[in-house]
């Protein structure tokens, strides 16, 4: 008998629709100011380019500090109280930024926005409310929502700035936080029980091993550089479009819309072809090199609409490919029972990259103008390219979760050995208290019949 993947049940659909909405509202609020803030900041008391960049990226610092502790706290006090508290902090920070007349006030508001680091708690609640075999489907939906929120923010930010201004965008962000709280309390089911899920949540005892894993560290460095460059770029691009291209801020969407739509269209075909031909390492290195080339185009003193559009197309095409690839590579490279910790460390590097990119990009812009920022981003991308050349081609494996029921520790070890002996299973760990077996499998050689003899529904995740 072969077990077939089952659709999401009504509880899972309700949970995922609500939690994806919460994630989307929060990320939309964070990113709406990205394409418009640099120009707005010039009119604030105490403005310097460094402080403007710091305001853009400071949320990354506080989010990096609080995201793992908030996730662990949710194990003790419950998911919903932690998420509500985080959204309240996010909303208060938005109000402070909206009311601020000085750079310091906005920086404090943005920092407070970042303290509302609910990502780990939301993902833990997703895991509580979905069956093991639906976990990756659920995480994919969350990931798509985050990506869509980023794209919408880049497109809507300049349009909203025209009608409500940047202060209005901050007020809107506070409203989005309140809406997210309403969705959580009214729509999202409350789990019967919450447990620690090793595939989505970090374990403090595993940090040293994860940080000592060279392959994981290469991907962590990658996402740090990626978000460092992204934030630094938005210190420069708004000024470039206004001063060198002659495009008013409220017309910036005319640049972003075709660039983002065209660049997004190539992501899936590029990744599918690379997976099929076992060329993931080459795609990774090639995308990093394309990012560097995009910065070379922006080096030029004479820029036209088409030149900037070409540079941004290259940037967003490569950025979207890398943003989609890297989490998958982390999952493939991490030891199967360290996946949650690996993802938590990866996210911390991502947020720290946003912080460093904003602060350092702002300082460089103030000292050396746009050329200084582009030289820095080009140099750090070449460094990443050299790192990427040394990355091993990742194993062609996927993760499967198999519900095995509660086991005695000794039996759990025996069961892991039995599962690991099946052809195509490259790694197997059974967590007795979760009643789940975590497997890495090569589906091209997996002995499905042997796996099915265990009597469990081994749906791919």
Image: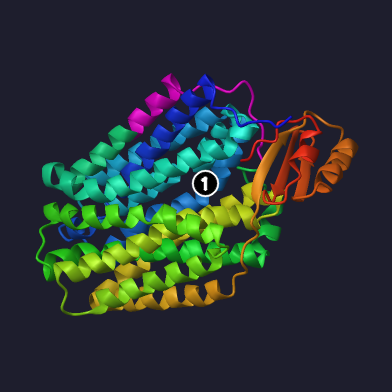
- Residue at 47% over, 23% down: 14
- Residue at 51% over, 29% down: 81
**10 Å neighbourhood of mark 1: few (<14), some, or many (≥20)?**
many
Q: Nearer the viewer, residue 53 or 458?
A: 458
Placement of the C terminus among the 4 image quadrants:
top right
At which x and y percent is residue 413?
Answer: 86, 42
At which x and y percent is residue 331?
Answer: 61, 52
Viewer can see residue 118: no
Q: Quadrant of residue 182?
A: top left
- Residue at 85% over, 39% down: 415
Taking the image as shown, residue 219 lies to the left or right of residue 425, namely: left
* Relative to 294, residue 112 above or below: above
Taking the image as shown, residue 375 lies to the left or right of residue 245, namely: right
* Relative to 116, residue 35 above or below: below
- Residue at 33% over, 43% down: 28
Badge 1 element: helix
Placement of the N terminus among the 4 image quadrants:
top right
Q: Quadrant of residue 458?
A: top right
Disc tally is 1
The answer to if 184 sits in the magenta stretch is yes
Instruction: Magenta stretch: give its range.
Output: 177-197
């Amino acid at each position: 008998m072969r077990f077939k993947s089952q659709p999401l049940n009504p509880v899972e659909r309700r949970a995922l629709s609500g939690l994806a909405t919460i994630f989307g509202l929060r990320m939309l609020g964070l990113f709406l100011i990205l394409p418009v803030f640099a120009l707005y900041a010039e009119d604030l008391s105490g403005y310097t380019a460094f402080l403007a960049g710091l305001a853009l990226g400071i949320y990354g610092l506080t989010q990096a500090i609080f995201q793992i502790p908030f996730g662990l706290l949710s194990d003790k006090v419950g998911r919903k109280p932690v998420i509500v508290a985080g959204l309240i902090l996010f909303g208060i920070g938005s109000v402070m930024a909206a009311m601020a007349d000085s750079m310091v006030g906005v920086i404090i508001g943005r920092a407070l926005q970042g303290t509302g680091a609910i990502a780990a708690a939301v993902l833990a609640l997703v895991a509580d409310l979905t069956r093991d075999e639906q976990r990756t489907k659920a995480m994919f939906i969350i990931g798509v929502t985050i990506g869509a929120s980023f794209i919408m923010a880049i497109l809507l930010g300049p349009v909203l700035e025209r009608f409500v201004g940047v202060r209005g965008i901050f007020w809107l962000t506070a409203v989005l936080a309140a809406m997210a709280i309403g969705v959580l309390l009214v729509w999202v089911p409350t789990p019967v029980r919450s447990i620690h899920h090793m595939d989505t949540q970090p374990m403090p005892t595993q940090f040293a091993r994860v940080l000592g894993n060279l392959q994981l560290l290469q991907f962590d460095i990658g996402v740090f550089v990626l978000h460092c460059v992204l934030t630094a770029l938005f210190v420069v691009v708004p000024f470039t479009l206004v001063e060198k291209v002659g495009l008013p801020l409220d017309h910036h969407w005319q640049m972003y819309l075709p660039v983002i739509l065209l660049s997004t269209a190539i992501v899936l075909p590029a990744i599918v072809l690379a997976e099929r031909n076992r060329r993931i390492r080459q795609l990774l290195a090639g995308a990093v090199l394309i990012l560097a080339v995009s910065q070379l185009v922006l080096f030029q003193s004479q820029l036209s609409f088409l030149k900037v559009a070409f540079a941004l197309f290259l940037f967003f095409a490569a950025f979207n490919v890398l943003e989609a690839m890297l989490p998958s590579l982390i999952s493939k490279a991490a030891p199967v029972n360290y996946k949650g910790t690996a993802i938590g460390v990866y996210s911390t590097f991502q947020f720290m990259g946003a912080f460093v990119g904003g602060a350092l990009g702002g300082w460089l812009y103030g000292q050396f103008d746009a050329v200084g920022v582009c030289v820095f981003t080009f140099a750090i991308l070449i460094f990443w390219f050299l790192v990427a050349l040394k990355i091993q081609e990742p194993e062609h494996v996927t993760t499967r979760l198999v519900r095995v029921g509660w086991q005695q520790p000794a039996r759990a070890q025996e069961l892991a050995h039995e599962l690991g002996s099946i052809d195509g299973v490259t790694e197997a760990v059974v967590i007795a208290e979760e009643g789940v077996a975590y497997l890495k499998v090569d589906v091209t050689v997996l002995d499905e019949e042997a796996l099915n003899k265990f009597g469990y529904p081994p749906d791919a995740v």
